Amino acid sequence: MGGFDRTKAYAPQEATFFDDGREIELLHFVYSHPKLESIRGSPKDVLAAIDEFGRTKKYLMNVGEDKGRIVCDLIAEVKPNTMVELGGYVGYSCILFGDAVRTAGGLRYFSFERNPEFAAVISSLVDLAGLSDIVKVIVGSSDESIARFHASGTLKHIDLMFLDHYKPAYTTDLKLCEELKLVTPGSVLAADNVIKPGNPPYLEYVRSTVQEKRKKVEEGAKGVNTEGFAERNVKQYAKRIETERFNESAGNPNLVYESKLVNSFEPTGVPVILLSFVTLPFSISIVFLSLIWAKLRPQPRSLDPYNASDKKTILITGISMTKGLSIARLLSQHTPHCIIGADTSAVSPGRFSRSVSAFHKLSPPDGKDAEPYIDSLLHVIKTEEVDLWISCSSVVAAVGDGQVVRLAENAMGSEFRAVQFSEDVVAVLHEKDEFIEYVRSLDLLVPESRRCTDDREVLDVLLANKSFTGEGEEREKEKERRREWIMKPIGVDDKARNQMMTLLPFASPQKTREYVKSLEVSALNPFQLQQYIHGEEYCTHALVIRGHITAFVACPSSELLMYYEALPADSHLAREMLAFTQRVARDGGESFTGHLSFDFLIEGKGRNAKLYPIECNPRVHTAVALFSDTPQMAGAYLSIFSPTSVLADREIVAPRAPTYSYYWIGHDLVTLLILPLFDLLWGRATLEDVLEGVAEFGEHLVYWRDGTFTVQDPLPFLVLYHVYWPLRFLYSIVTGTAWSRINVSTTKVFES
Ligand SMILES: C[S@@+](CC[C@H](N)C(=O)[O-])C[C@H]1O[C@@H](n2cnc3c(N)ncnc32)[C@H](O)[C@@H]1O
């Protein structure tokens, strides 16, 4: 089982999100996990199993990875002998922090939990994680338990305390700990949720001066103060505790706290800027040596047989991305034509490639208004008298690019060519639901899918009550009844995408209703309800000219699409995916020209495997980088100038064998080396994990190719890592834009 999943969020929080039996369900889930034996004794794997439940089954109010990491860092820094947590729930923080305390050389971790059922869950999972020797779970209200443990001498001092229970009790329990001298100068407190949903009394208390606190004590202010809390927080545990009662300790007003607010959730990018700075001398040396090498040993140009006297101007848009850059390099190396680059970013790495002879900055779309972008692109096409435009734009510009084709053809006349589908084609292929309907109309296999614009439509499917008749039919209905579904937001919404993997329906119809309600499905926020297919995901990239596939590659889809390994063109799977692509292309007919890529899920194995298309991207895919060593790919692009009769006879170009696989060194450096190393330092990973990362990185470095770097054209690499990304991060910091992940190859930033 892998470690924490950095990319997948928990299922959304429903109206009732705890104490409804899910905690016991979690126990059943973990103890019937197929990997139970390897989970046993491994805190990391128990946490991963809890995360898996939170993602695929039900939301859990755990501390979460981001905040968890902050507290783990604090544990490594403070090295507490004794750590206390108030509010243990199902034991996520207890296992995470208990393990971190043990790694930091600590002795004891006390988890105070009021609900006996939850406490039993914690104890069971702590035992499974092999932490029973260090963790003590105490059932009861925090104040009573603290006082009891202090009186018995079991709890003498608190070095680090994590407050994560009933919000109004943060202050009263802290005061009690002060009075009992459990919290003294040097003790460290970490309090969750003090900003959101907010805890004004706690913040006010730890930020008050000694004089202010003394004054309050003299005024006789004590007890629970629920002012400034949201009603739902005050009544959070009302199902079991009708009236919350807490100790009325006056605390120790003489203690002064140094208070620091730590925001979690969004990465800042600062470490990456620093990394870019530190590695700059190394990159400059590599680039310098490469430039000398390229001068001494110029790259042989193998020109495909195209009429050099008829020199054409080829415009490639989207050259900040690897895909645009790869195509520009390919055409500049293997054709005699003039290559021009364009992009909405002025510091596009591709701008500095020796393969482009001119660069134009395009205006970005203004929100939903694509006009500035369209106008600037048309202007470039006209002024540069472009013969062929190869669009490599991002998803944001997809529809705008579709409009430019029509406008440019009108303006430039019949000689103008574009590798870009028209807007009506883009509209059908791009939208998940329209695409599935379209494929269904071709009589091809599709996953069961429905567009839903209100809860009713979703629930009719999820909660359908089938009555069975007949043997065979009964079996079929049973299959249907057992079908699992996922909800995909229609449109591009990074935040919603994180929630796509919640499997539906839940065991309880009520829970399913609550979940669906939480998605706020409406005509303005439509969802696609899609049958969940268990299987491996693959992606493809094809170049289609007038309904004919001229180049094709398929490869396994990797997390974040940062690794590309081509499937052999003659493999059964690749051939099946090609056949599907050909069917769609044929249906498009004479006017069907553009880049076409599909995502497939493969159910089953071998020749019986079923191929389910799940999405179509009517634009160039980064997998085009796999053609970097294939001169014939340049010919495939230029075949757009050939008559259609010639196209039909062309062989479909596949990446030249043996085909290099592709990775991005910046991505690997961070995910395979730096993050695991930090995890090791803070006790969240083992040496084995780190060595695994190093070995994978080494393999990529030696046997794979970086998507941006080439010895003959090294400047885009330097600009990508030392200009483009540092500026993007700086921009996010200055504008306060939160992000959760980035894609180095497409320069996409996923907002959080
Ligand atoms: C947000 S959850 C804790 C999550 C847990 N720290 C984690 O990150 O895995 C809050 C927990 O505090 C418990 N709780 C609430 N009031 C409490 C009190 N006065 N004493 C002890 N536990 C309390 C609740 O039963 C609930 O399990």
Image (cartoon, rainbow, N blue to C red):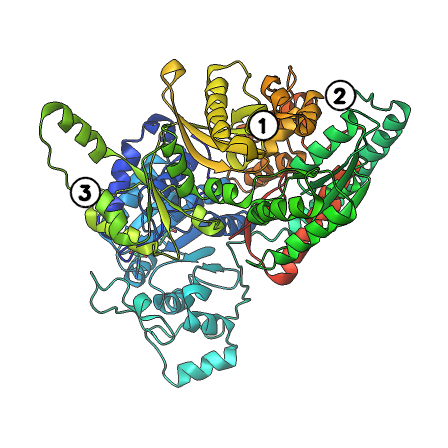
Q: Which residue is mark 1?
A: 564
> Which quadrant of the figure has residue 731?
bottom right
Q: Residue at x 70, y 22 (%)?
A: 629
Q: Which residue is mark 3?
A: 464
Q: Which residue is mark 2?
A: 304
Residue 444 vs 616, above or below: the answer is: above
| Along the line of sight, the residue nearer the viewer: 208 or 451 | 451
Quarter that holds the N terminus: top left
Under mark 3, the amino acid is: Ala
Task: Label 1: state its secondary structure.
Answer: loop
Question: Would you say residue 104 is visible in this rendering?
Answer: no
Q: Earlier in the sequence, mark 1 or mark 2?
A: 2
Callout in the foreground (2, 3): 2
Q: Disc 2 to disc 3, how far (Cα)?
A: 60 Å
**Percent of width and height locating residue 175:** 40, 69
**Percent of width and height locating residue 465:** 15, 41
Q: Residue at x 20, y 51 (%)?
A: 510
**Percent of width and height locating residue 160:** 47, 55
| Along the line of sight, the residue nearer the viewer: 177 or 481 | 481
Under mark 1, the amino acid is: Tyr
Question: Callout 1: few (<14), some (14-19), or many (20+) C-alpha neighbours within 10 Å?
Answer: many
Q: Earlier in the sequence, mark 2 or mark 3?
A: 2
> Which quadrant of the figure has residue 231?
bottom left
Q: Is mark 2 within 8 Å of ligand 1?
A: no
Task: Label 2: state its secondary structure.
Answer: loop
Q: Is mark 3 within 8 Å of ligand 1?
A: no
Which residue is most to the left? 469
Question: Callout 3: few (<14), some (14-19), or many (20+) C-alpha neighbours within 10 Å?
Answer: few
- Asked whether the residues under the numbered discs 2 and 3 touch, taking CB atoms below 8 Å apart as contact, a structural biologist would say no
